[in-house]
Image (cartoon, rainbow, N blue to C red):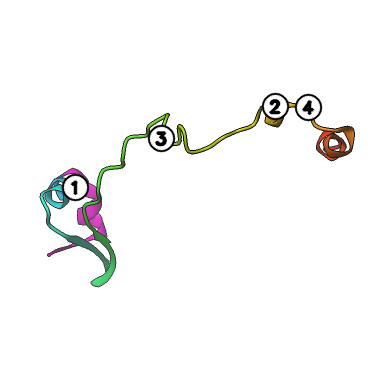
Amino acid sequence: MLVVNVHQAKTQLSRLLARVEAGEEVVIARRGDPVVRLVSCKPLAKRQADVLKGKVNIPESFFDPLPEEELAPWESR
């Protein structure tokens, strides 16, 4: 585990990120006290537009206009 101070982290951020991506942990310290630990994270999963297809049923009535008593509070804003 590599420990660097804040100034080193600011000037060498790209190098530190490369080391983290290679699997190393980096700790950033302020005046010798550890403040934060940089670790690699998993890439985000790609979104799929049809992930809920066939699992959710939205009735046609969902798109009907709201009754006046329900619509009024929204329009008074």
Look at the image and tell me whether residue 31 can be seen: no
Q: Is residue 47 left or right of residue 42?
A: right
Identify the residue at horizontal 18%, vertical 43% (top origin): 14
Please, what secondary structure does the residue beneath circle 1 have?
A: helix
Of the residues shown, which amino acid type is indicated by label 2? Phe
The label nearer to you, 2 versus 1, is 2
Between the C-alphas of marks 4 and 3, the distance is: 28 Å
Disc 1 versus disc 3: distance between alpha carbons? 33 Å
Image coordinates for residue 40, horizontal then vertical, percent: 21, 52
Magenta-colored span:
1-14
C-alpha distance separating marks 1 and 4: 52 Å
Mark found first going from the N terminus, 1 or 3: 1
User: What separation in Å lies between label 4 and label 2 (alpha carbons)?
Assistant: 6 Å
Q: Where is residue 29 in the image (x, y as percent from the top left)?
A: 25, 66
Q: Mark 4 points at which residue?
A: 65
Number of residues whose C-alpha sits closer than 10 Å to that of mark 3, classed few (under 14), some (14–19) or many (20 or more): few
Count of marks overlaid on the render: 4
Q: What residue type is labelled 1?
A: Leu
Residue linked to disc 1? 17
In the structure shown, which secondary structural element does the residue marked by tag 2 occupy? helix
Q: Are marks 1 and 4 in contact (CB under 8 Å)?
A: no
Q: Residue 63 carries which label?
A: 2
Could you tell me the amino acid type at mark 3?
Answer: Val
Magenta stretch: includes residue 11? yes
The picture places residue 28, in percent across and down from the top left corner, at 24, 62
Reading the chain from its start, which is encountered first: label 3 or label 2? 3
Check if residue 7 falls in the magenta segment.
yes
**Residue bearing the label numbered 3:** 51
Counting residues from the start of the chain, the first of labels 4 and 3 encountered is 3
